[in-house]
Image: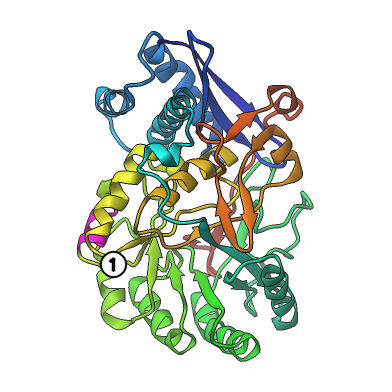
Amino acid sequence: MKIVAADVIITSPTRNFVTLKVTTDEGVTGLGDATLNGRELSVAAYLKEHVVPLLLNRDPANIEDTWQFLYRSGYWRRGPVTMAAIAAVDMALWDIKGKVAGMPVYQLLGGASRRGLSTYGHASGRDLPELFDSIRHEKEHGFSAIRVQTSVPGIKALYGVAAQAQASGERYDYEPAQRTALPVEEDWDTRAYLRHIPGVFEAVRNEFGPDLALLHDGHHRMTPLQAAKLGKDLEPYDLFWLEDCTPAENQDALRLVRQHTTTPLAIGEVFNTIYDIKDLISEQLIDYVRCASTHFGGISPLKKVMDFAAVYQVKSGFHGPTDVSPVGLAAQMHVGMAIHNFGLQEYMEHSEKTNSVFEQSLTFVEGLLHPGDKPGLGVELNEEEAAKYAYQPAYLPYNRLADGTVHDW
């Protein structure tokens, strides 16, 4: 079997997606997700101009060899653009292998380790009554673990609050990338945030009791010491995890946080290779790996990093918002089904338009997500539907402090 075509398909049902479709001389096709939110066309160009010519006439069965070839032959390694492009190829080849074998990909990775994937939903509010209503909605939908985000007095616009006004009319936490000529500027005040958040979690615990698993996303906006303070202040409310409490380009930053709090830590959604996270795992400075198949090079390296993490009792918490396409979500669901050290899967349902473009076999029943048992990844692209939605430029927001300093968003 040989690869005879590899097509890059860009579509924008509610938000932009980049999909690679690999076709063999026997007519078997595979899909891969190459979406990089706010920089989609950079990956599309990388694929079209640099990767696709290298795939033609290769044997699609040689997944590991192809991965190593694409990673090492470029010389300039790593980075989100390169790794998203490699991820798309890797996913597509696993999809083909599953279809040829007549099995879902998780069976090829060792078989099922569980009935389904425990997931967490997203609740937010501009005030406590709105937040409580959002939490109740997520519980009614079947989630037993819920991420809690809230507005903060004195901050006009804040990441993760669904009811926040947005020109597109979409939920802000569903797709914060806005279709504007330039990125939208938001404001930030760390001291106001640190004062407000512990009281929110106290109120949530008082309202919903001790059994509900609660999570919170700091979205890289704190210094290590500030993150340590928040983690310590949240200890009485027994968080399942505190996510992205500080930027972790410097892996030593998490050491300081760990020294001061027992709140579990999750990080990794902006990481691209094992080298970004290996010390955090081996020194047990985190509890959950948040890496996403799409931005981490695909199924192959995601499975490897979790096998490495298992040695240190670190579990998975794969990134799963709507800037990971249904193809990327399916890829990491299959990994989650197979590994022993699964922790929790983020699940934010895609829009109806997106689901009309990406036809999926996944199920979500009683809080458990399952990729389905169709051969391959279990996702097919409706190209006729995809063609209805042309790419539209969109940018994620950015933050400034009160004095005008650009800050982490």
Q: Nearer the viewer, residue 44 or 184?
A: 44
Rendered residue at 55%/81% (across/down): 192
Rendered residue at 40%/19% (across/down): 51
Span of residues in magenta:
277-282
For disc 1, the marked residue is: 253
Q: Nearer the viewer, residue 186 or 94?
A: 94
- Give left or right: position of 335 versus 175: left
Badge 1 amino acid: Ala
Q: Quadrant of residue 86?
A: top left
Q: Compared with residue 114, is residue 38 higher up or lower down, i.e. above or below?
A: above
Residue 106, how many percent across, how many down? 43, 42
Q: Secondary structure at mark 1?
A: helix
Residue 318, how many percent across, how many down? 45, 54
- Give left or right: position of 161 versus 25: right
Rendered residue at 29%/49% (across/down): 305
The N terminus sits in image quarter:
top left
Q: Indicate yes or no whether the magenta region holds residue 373.
A: no
Residue 340, how many percent across, how many down? 34, 56
Residue 268, how many percent across, how many down? 39, 55
Q: Compared with residue 373, is residue 207 higher up or lower down, i.e. above or below?
A: below
Instruction: For residue 254, say whether it is visible.
Output: yes
